[in-house]
Structure formats: structure tokens, C-alpha cells
Image (cartoon, rainbow, N blue to C red):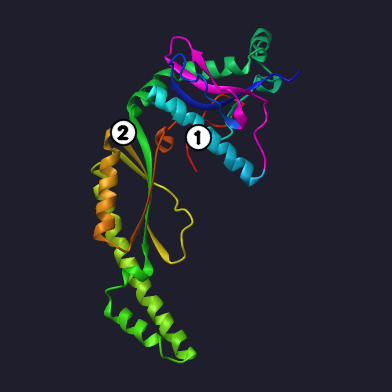
Amino acid sequence: MTERALYVYALVPHRPGAADGVTGVDGHPLRLLDVPGTGVAALVHDADPTPYQGTDEEVRRRVAEQDAAVVAVWERTGTALPMTFNVLVAPDTPSDVPADAPRDARDARSARSAEERLREWIASHADGLRARMDSLADRAELRVEITVDRAASARDDERARSLEAELADRSPGLRRLLTRQLEQIRRESAERLADALYADVRHRLLAVAEDLRERSRSVRDADELGVLSAALLVRRSDIEAVGAVLAAVRDEQPAARIRFLGPWPPYSFADLSDDGPQGASAPAAARG
């Protein structure tokens, strides 16, 4: 019989009962794996030692279930170091033990379960993990994406208004020419506004956030130009202040399009080492 692996959701401060009633991927009941003497616990469920696979829809559903589980326990513990999707810790296999290791060492290592392997890894990194949790206590991650609507950015441009007026009563061929000219004016106007907004908004957000990490920009409307896509680390008490900054930007710049999401556990700021327990996906935290 194949020994069971552990599917790992997050590392959290050990709080007895923090996972009670919480379910994760595919409805699996979750538990806290305590590591005595460290104050750290892993949020896990027992699993087969193979990653989840499936259709895009199934993966999205499972990622959402994992997020919901991490959020539920994060709200109870006050801090968490979330894992990526499909982080598994498997029990030892003979290939994990160096061939030249003493026989007693080989026997001891080959007997390690997934729980023992994970506990050993946490114990060896306990000081750093506790320090990271302390630094993230009572903090949340917010996501901000700001774009500029090209047409709206040129609304006050006399050249653009003149071309828009001409388009109504021109021949199809001339309309195509004028449309290209109008698109060029809008593109240049949007680029100027985006450059000005980027520096201004980044400065204003960092006045209320503890950290800002830029992210790859998500798919947007073809008529929009990207300004800033970022994850913010903020104290929970400062979430409303971030909202106020973004509301002011929206009022000052009607061409700005702002998407503001969260709060979530600090996926982008967990900064876990990438040398996780052998047989597991690297426990680096990120959120897609």
C-alpha cells in the first residue's frame, strides 16, 4: 500500500482548533500538523503523492477552494505563509537516501513518513519562519491594477475632438485615414498620462502601504493602456486608506480605470525558501 503524502496549504502559528471545520481542495477536511517546540504548524490534508491534474475549470475551482481554506485559517491565526497550488510532501523512497550512507541511516531515512519529513524541515527553518510570520502579523495583501482608457485620455485634446467631428460626414476611405490619425493621438495621450500616473500613484500608495511588488499585468481591454499592476502589503487598519488613495486618483483622472482586490493572506510577501523538503514542490508562496 502506497504511503500517504501531505498536501500543504500554509504555515501558520500553532493555534489549537484553528482548522476545525475548514475544508480544502475537493472538500478534504484540514488539520494542523504541529511541530513541538517551534510554535509553527502546517495546514494540511492527507493526500495521494501525485499532484492534482484536470481541466482548466477544475484547476480554477481547486485553486479557489485552496484560497478559501487559507483565508479561513489566516483570519483565525492572524498571520500565515501561504503555499502555491499543488505543494506535496511525500514519504521517503529509497532513491532519496544516498547510496553511500550508512545502513542504519538508510534504514532510518527510508522509514520517514510525510509528517516526519515536513516536521524536520519546519524545525530546521523554525527561527526564520517565526520571524517571517511575526513581520506579517495583522497584515494583508491587496491587488491594484490601474490602466488608462485611450479614448478618455484624449477627451480634452482639440485635435482629437476635431477629428471625431470630421468622421461623421467623410467618405469611407477618408474615415479610415482620420481614424488612424485619431488612434495615434489617443495612444500618445494615453502614454503621457500613464507615465505621469505611474510615478504619482506608486508614490502615494507607498505612503500607506508597507511594501509594493509589481506584477505581470493581466489581460485587459484592448482600448486600455497599462499603468501599474501591483501587490501591496498593508496593515489591516490601513486598507481603507489605500481605498481612499485610489478613489482620489479616480476622481482626479477620469480616464483612469482602477481594479482593487483583496484583502488576502500575503501570498506575494511570504518569501519562503525554495529549498523545501525533498519530494515536495518548492514551498515558495505566490498567487496567480
| Residue 92, image x, y percentages | 66, 19
Mark 1 closeness class: few <14, some 14–19, many ≥20 residues within 10 Å: many
Q: CA distance from mark 2 to mark 1?
A: 18 Å
From the image, tell me which residue sits under label 2: 236
Q: Quadrant of the N terminus?
A: top right
Q: Secondary structure at mark 1?
A: helix
**Residue 132, x across and y down, in percent:** 37, 26
The amino acid type, in three-letter code, at marker 1 is: Asp
Q: Is residue 226 left or right of residue 246?
A: right
N-terminal of the two: label 2 or label 1? 1
Q: Residue at x 47, y 34 (%)?
A: 285
Numbered mark located on residue 252 in the image: none
Q: Does the magenta segment cover residue 214?
A: no
Look at the picture and state if 218 lies above or below 55: below
The question of residue 43 being in magenta is answered with: yes
Query: Which quadrant would residue 46 be assigned to in this image?
Result: top right
The image position of residue 90, as x and y in percent, is: 64, 23
Q: Residues within 10 Å of mark 2 (few under 14, many from 20)?
A: some
Compared to residue 165, the image places residue 280 above or below, namely: above
Task: For mark 2, give the secondary structure.
Answer: helix
Per the rendered image, the range of residues in magenta is: 26-54
Tags 2 and 1 touching, CB below 8 Å: no
Q: Residue under circle 1?
A: 67
Could you tell me the amino acid type at mark 2? Answer: Arg
